[in-house]
Amino acid sequence: MPELPVTERPAQGRIDSHLHLWELGEGRYSWLNPSLGMLHATFTAAQAQEELFAAGVDQAILVQADDTAADTEAMLAAAAANPWITGVVGWLPLEEPARAAQLLDRWGANPAFCGVRTLIHDDPRADVLDLPAVRQTLALLETAGLALDIPNAFPRHLGQAKGLAQAFPEMPIVIDHLGKPPRDGSAEDMDEWERQLRAVAAQPNTVAKVSGLHTGGAEFSAAALARVWDVALSAFGPQRLMFGGDWPVSLLGGSYSETVAVSASLFDQLAPAEAQEIWSGTASRSYRR
């Protein structure tokens, strides 16, 4: 993943690299159910814009929340209608290379389409990213210059990401939510997450999102995130980390402005140019915005 020096790629403002929109309806978002409380509702671009602008965030990249073409089509339509939406990480059927190629031909012509993700954390197979059909589809992504997001990778898929990055060295591999560290788990679990994350970070075409760190009953504050942040920063450095708000999922742990404020209290410990990399530079490079 070739990168220009920071001095040649000035970045301004703040980009939320991980935002969701969804509209409840028949056959949509099967994982959403009343047990999820406030998330079992429709979340629109207008609502998101109000939250982002109030918190001082200028732009956002929408990320798929359903393994359907309809979800991607809805995000692309939202991007066309809202200039603050700078990109869309859509879905492709990774195990169907021929169908994926057809969809890629259609969506790839849209300048907003900048990456692909599927909900592999809901797949019980630990080797899904190594399947031959999946690798065929990922080769199409690499050729197209698109990033691959990997959600909630720990414990099943974070280890695979290292080999994936080696197999596709020109494709940005984006580790969502820092791989989902088990902040409410055991010390041994945290140690294993750190080992796997550092192994992934050793691959130069990997980046990670400081996002989705609300975990169960674990406290969400700069102090509570100290270890996670220190590991991420030392492993990736600011030029390979990006901010993500994970709205509206993050509402389970607090308001959007609270999420931004906690993130700012971490990033703003850095030099201004380094903090700006996390606020916008890394996302701009990884998703070619």
Image: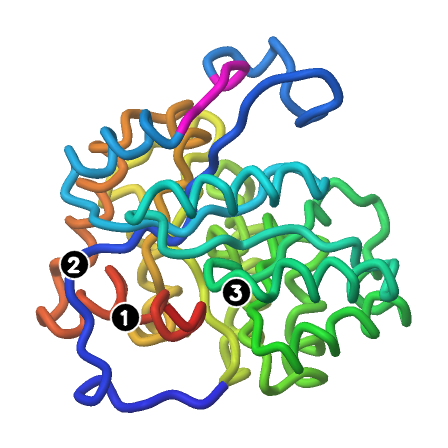
Question: Which amino acid is tagged 1?
Answer: Gly
Q: What's the CA distance linking mark 2 and mark 1? A: 9 Å
Q: Residues within 10 Å of mark 3 (few under 14, many from 20)?
A: many
Q: Residue at x 69, y 45 (%)?
A: 119
Q: How far is the residue under mark 1 from the one under mark 3?
A: 14 Å
- Give the x, y percent position of residue 118: 68, 50
Q: Which residues make up the magenta segment?
A: 39-44
Q: Are marks 1 and 3 in contact (CB under 8 Å)?
A: no
Q: In this figure, which residue is indicated by the disc labeled 1?
A: 281
**Which amino acid is tagged 3?**
Val
Disc 2 packing (10 Å; few <14; some 14–19; many ≥20): few
Q: Main secondary structure of the magenta part?
A: loop
Residue at the disc numbered 3:
174
Quadrant where the C terminus sits is bottom left
Kindly identify which residue carries mark 2: 13
**Residue 250: percent from the left, percent from the top?**
40, 32
Which label belongs to residue 263? none
**Left or right: where does residue 213 sit relative to residue 195?**
left
Q: Are marks 2 and 1 in contact (CB under 8 Å)?
A: no
**Label pair 3/2, CB-CB below 8 angstroms:** no
* Residue type for callout 2: Gly
Q: Earlier in the sequence, mark 3 or mark 2?
A: 2
Magenta span includes 25: no
Q: State which mark lies toward you, 1 or 3.
A: 1
Q: Secondary structure at mark 1?
A: helix
The residue at 14%/67% (across/down) is: 270
Which colour scheme appears in the figure? rainbow
Left or right? Give the position of 214 relative to 65.
left
Give SS at disc 3: strand
